[in-house]
Image (cartoon, rainbow, N blue to C red):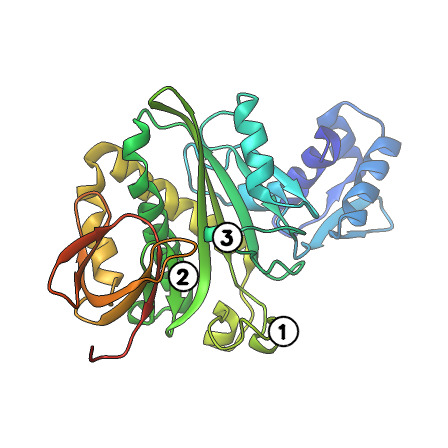
């Protein structure tokens, strides 16, 4: 949105439901009343409900269900995350856009939001179901001063942040779990996925991009058949629609707080919160470590200081899994 309509929206929002005269709006901006009318029409075209009174005043009666930057930022309680937001009605992948922004020098905390993705990506080359105007698809540019060998735990910290935001929304923290390394489960079903990608210079990270998709308002019957048995949305769990703008603000606040703690204290500052939601400990699992792998079964023991999954294989050996796909297995070998 250009500066003119944005300033009119700010003034109407600040009026708290009262009318603002066209004269006061034009005087405050130093433009004609005709220009104010044009700015109001721009806002109406974006879905804002603005009533005009016979005396020439304007009143904001409602905001659209869109993840516009100005809507998210109006109540955003962060210092550095989301202070620059790039909004797209549709894009192929928010991660692809964020990576391009990062390569072009976008600062720490730059955020991309899309209403839909035509080629949303998940871990291990999987696609992420991204229908329009229902969920949250976002990517954040980060510029931590870390070596490439230290980045694996950042995605675990992100998973903690998403889990906290979901738990606040549903009001039922025990129902929210993390499936190592970064899927957030609600009632045992997947409601969020996270994809981390990076750029590096020699052995140091130049930028990270955290891509986060959260199923908010998609009904379970609307998921593709292959996902219906394993996926859910926050709205399906609580039985009512989720305010997507409020959730985005909540997620960005949780993510900033968690990453600030992580930066100050390392993974040790976040690890107990991850382990509290990792409820596979003591359960039998099957691990597929990559394409073509036959995998192995064992008992999950927890995670180590580097975020790797500790597993006692059926042959008794303890291994630390750095990357792979984990599912519950039969309880006996």
Would you name the residue on which mark 1 appears?
A: 222
| Mark 1 → mark 2, Cα distance in angstroms | 20 Å
The image quadrant that residue 29 belongs to is: top right
Q: Secondary structure at mark 1?
A: helix
Q: Is residue 194 left or right of residue 90?
A: left
- Of the image marks 2 and 3, the number of the one nearer the N terminus: 3
Q: Which is more N-terminal, label 1 or label 3?
A: 3
Badge 2 is on which residue?
Answer: 166
Could you tell whether 115 is left or right of 5 in the image? Answer: left
Q: Residue at x 42, y 63 (%)?
A: 169
Tell me which residue sits at (63%, 73%) in the image: 222
Please tell me the numbered disc located at residue 320. none
- In this picture, residue 12 sits left or right of residue 219: right
Residue 321 locus on image (x, y percent): 25, 52
Question: What residue is disc 3 on?
Answer: 122
Q: Would you call the spot at circle 1 few (<14 residues within 10 Å), some (14-19), or many (20 or more)?
A: few
């Amino acid at each position: 949105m250009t500066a003119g309509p944005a300033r009119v929206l700010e003034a109407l929002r600040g009026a708290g439901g009262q009318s603002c005269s066209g004269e006061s709006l034009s005087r405050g901006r130093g433009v004609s009343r005709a220009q104010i009318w044009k700015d109001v029409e721009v806002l109406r075209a974006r879905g804002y409900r603005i009533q005009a009174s016979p005396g020439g005043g304007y009143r904001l009666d409602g905001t659209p269900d869109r993840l516009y930057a100005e809507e998210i930022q109006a109540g955003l309680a962060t210092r550095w995350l989301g202070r620059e937001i790039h909004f797209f009605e549709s894009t192929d992948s928010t991660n692809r856009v964020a990576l391009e922004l990062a390569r072009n020098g976008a600062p720490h905390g730059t955020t991309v939001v899309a209403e839909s993705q035509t080629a949303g990506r998940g871990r291990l080359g999987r696609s992420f179901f991204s229908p329009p105007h229902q969920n949250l698809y976002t990517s954040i540019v980060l510029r931590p001063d870390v070596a490439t060998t230290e980045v694996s735990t950042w995605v675990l910290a992100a998973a903690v942040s998403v889990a906290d935001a979901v738990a606040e929304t549903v009001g039922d923290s025990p129902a929210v779990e993390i499936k190592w390394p970064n899927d957030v489960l609600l009632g045992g079903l997947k409601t969020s996925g996270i994809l981390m990608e990076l750029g590096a210079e020699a052995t140091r990270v130049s930028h990270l991009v955290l891509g986060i998709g959260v199923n908010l308002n998609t009904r379970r019957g609307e998921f593709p058949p292959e996902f219906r048995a394993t996926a859910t949305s926050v709205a399906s769990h609580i039985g009512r629609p989720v305010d997507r703008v409020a959730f985005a603000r909540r997620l960005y606040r949780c993510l900033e707080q968690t990453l600030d703690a992580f930066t100050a204290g390392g993974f040790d500052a976040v690890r107990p919160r991850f382990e509290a939601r990792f409820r596979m400990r003591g359960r039998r699992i099957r691990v597929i470590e990559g394409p073509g792998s036959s995998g192995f079964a064992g008992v999950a023991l927890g995670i180590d200081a580097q975020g790797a999954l500790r597993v006692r294989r059926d042959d008794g050996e303890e291994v630390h899994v750095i990357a792979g796909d984990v599912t519950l297995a039969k309880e006996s070998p």
